[in-house]
Image: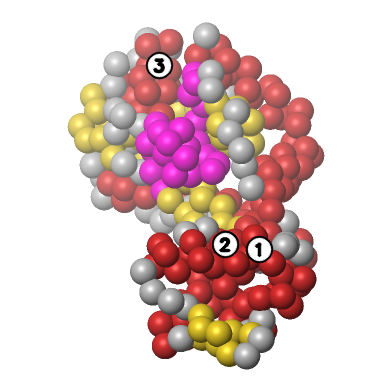
Amino acid sequence: MTLNQILYFQKVARLENYHQAAEELYISQPSLSRSMAALESELGVALFEKKGRGVTLTKAGKLFLEHADRIAGDCDVAVGKMQELSSDGGKIDIGYIFPLAGHYIPHKVRKFLNQEENKNVVFNFWQNHTPAIAEKVRTGELDVGFGGYLKMDDMEFFPLSAQELVIITPKEHPLSEMQEVPLVELDHYPVIGYESASWMGTYAKYLYRKYQVNPNTIVECPDEYSIVSLVRENFGIALMPQTDILLNADGIKIHKIMGLEIYRQVFMFWMKDRYRLPAVERFIKYMKEQQADDANDTENVSKIYLKFYI
């Protein structure tokens, strides 16, 4: 059974005349008759019976017409959905690291959806570490990811926001009155760190090796919220990016790193050679345009990460 046979059947059923149906379908009457005969043979029932110069539906034909109408209707809906996807609508699946959840991603997505051409777009959000996000981008479960840089030749990475790394301490701490704290002070106090599997966990270890720091990491956390909470309760101090999470964080002190300017760069990434819906392409273009004003800062910060990964 083919979709054409279903459409042909609908036409004959509506007009109750093979000749008229053939004319409207732009096919010959013998071709239409053969198509309907083949359909009846496949179904094992008669769909039409002669009535004067025309035909009328049998009981089986009336039942089959109900199903044929539903099938044709579903096809019309599917075509409409595909046309919607190919123009202004569709769903965009994005994944992002935890620090972007509070303001950055909600703010950027809201501005994107406020544009008239994007009013029919729907987003699906997923939070995790960069490696987990990259894996879902690779499998196609996510269209776009936001996180740290990974050396993956099959993905395109575009630099976005840069966040300076700082040291945070409890409010009542021997270092709390210092505006700038040497990185080596991490050797002298318990340290709250990132999970080893996370991008920041890997990056922090690289920095410790580079600057010959050997901190006593007493606990590893999945995100900045957990780190701030443990530092606030005087479990230790921490090295972390200056994210939105720190803006209204009570019970802690934020310190610049003495003599160093180290950044965590956030990248947007997607698969290089994979078809993307127009809505996804528009979102990628939009995010690039959003970053254009900070292009110089982004370029400088990106060099730090190139040194890290080369």
Marked residue nearer the N-terminal end (3 or 2): 2
Task: Inspect the magenta stretch and tell me whether residue 102 lies in it.
Answer: no
Which residue occupies the extreme left position in the image? 218
* Number of numbered labels in the structure image: 3
Task: Name which quarter of the figure residue 261 lies in.
Answer: top right
Mark 3 residue crowding within 10 angstroms, few (<14) / some (14–19) / many (20+): some
Query: Taking 192 as reference, is 106 above or below it?
Result: below
Label 3 sits on residue: 206
Label 2 sits on residue: 34
Name the residue rendered at 51%, 80% in the picture. 48
Q: Where is residue 45 in the image (x, y as percent from the top left)?
A: 39, 74
Q: Where is residue 265 in the image (x, y as percent from the top left)?
A: 56, 31
Q: Position of residue 30 (x, y in %)?
A: 66, 63
Answer yes or no: do the residues labelled 3 and 2 have beta carbons within 8 Å?
Answer: no
- Dot 2 amino acid type: Arg
Label 3 sits on a secondary structure element that is helix
* Res 260 visible: no
Name the residue rendered at 68%, 59% in the picture. 83
Name the residue rendered at 56%, 53% in the picture. 92
Q: The magenta stretch spans which residues?
A: 127-152
Label 1 sits on a secondary structure element that is helix
Task: Name which quarter of the figure residue 218 lies in.
Answer: top left
Q: Name the mark nearer the viewer: 3 or 2.
A: 2
- Dot 1 amino acid type: Pro
Residue 30 is tagged as 1
